[in-house]
Image: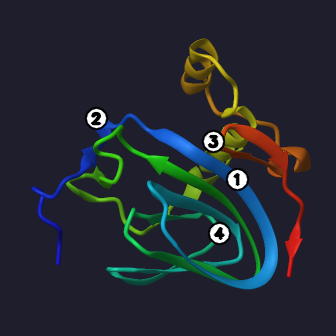
Amino acid sequence: MPESTSSPHVTVEEMQPRVDFASYWRVEAEQWYTYGVPSHHVLLVESGRLRARTPRGDVSAGPGDILCLRRELPNHYGYSGAVCYWETHLSFAPAPRTAWPLWLDGQPIPDVVALGSHAAAARSAYESLCLHLDRGGDLAQRREAGRPHLVEDDDEARDLRIFGGGVERVQDVAQ
């Protein structure tokens, strides 16, 4: 059943996004997460498959798809086997609307968005977040917000993640 347009939401025109966390994961394991985040959780699958359980049903995202998990407590997602994915926690609007979902064309953004030919641009944007999100100061943030997200494809770029404003190197995770 479609959600009412009177439900609290953020439109594209009203967006003022804020990224709280950005990372890249390259893992080979079986993992299922049950958690809560104070914002939205958006994952771009590079290889393998991610699964999620939402109030709207179970979904699966593969290469070139974005898995969009709203701020619904608790959130559930996981994977089995080898998977590589980019991850962000973000809000589409400042408080008090941080939990409100983004709406596109009069409805909530779907749980899974197939990017098709736009996947490479999304990957570049995620790389840019991981490399530049921690830059301090208003000028640096405005410069980053206004520039095209073009980052060279190299292993070093994909092994960085931002968390709480700091950068750390991510090792391959094997369990």
Asked if the residues shown at circle 3 and circle 4 are in contact, with their CB atoms under 8 angstroms apart, the answer is no
The reply, left or right, for residue 46 in relation to residue 172 is left
CA gap, disc 3 and disc 1:
12 Å
Q: Can the viewer see residue 115?
A: no
Residue at 33% x, 80% y is 55
Q: Secondary structure at mark 1?
A: strand
Q: Which residue is mark 3?
A: 125
Q: Secondary structure at mark 3?
A: helix
Q: Which residue is mark 1?
A: 23
Viewer-closest of 34 and 59: 34
Q: Can the viewer see residue 37?
A: yes
Closer to the chain start, of discs 1 and 4, is: 1
Q: Which residue is mark 2?
A: 13
Name which residue type carries label 3: Ala
Residue at 69% x, 83% y is 31
Q: Secondary structure at mark 4?
A: loop
Name which residue type carries label 2: Glu
The reply, left or right, for residue 3 in relation to residue 96 is left
Closer to the chain start, of discs 2 and 3, is: 2
Where in the figure is residue 118, as x and y percent of width and height? 56, 51
How many C-alpha atoms fall within 10 Å of the one at disc 2: few (<14), some, or many (≥20)?
few
Asked if the residues shown at circle 1 and circle 2 are in contact, with their CB atoms under 8 angstroms apart, the answer is no
CA gap, disc 2 and disc 3:
20 Å
Viewer-closest of 10 and 48: 10
Q: Nearer the viewer, mark 4 or mark 2?
A: 2
Where in the figure is residue 66, as x and y percent of width and height? 53, 62
Closer to the chain start, of discs 3 and 1, is: 1
How many C-alpha atoms fall within 10 Å of the one at disc 1: few (<14), some, or many (≥20)?
many
Q: Which residue is mark 4?
A: 63
Asked if the residues shown at circle 4 and circle 2 are in contact, with their CB atoms under 8 angstroms apart, the answer is no
Where in the figure is residue 134, as x and y percent of width and height? 69, 32
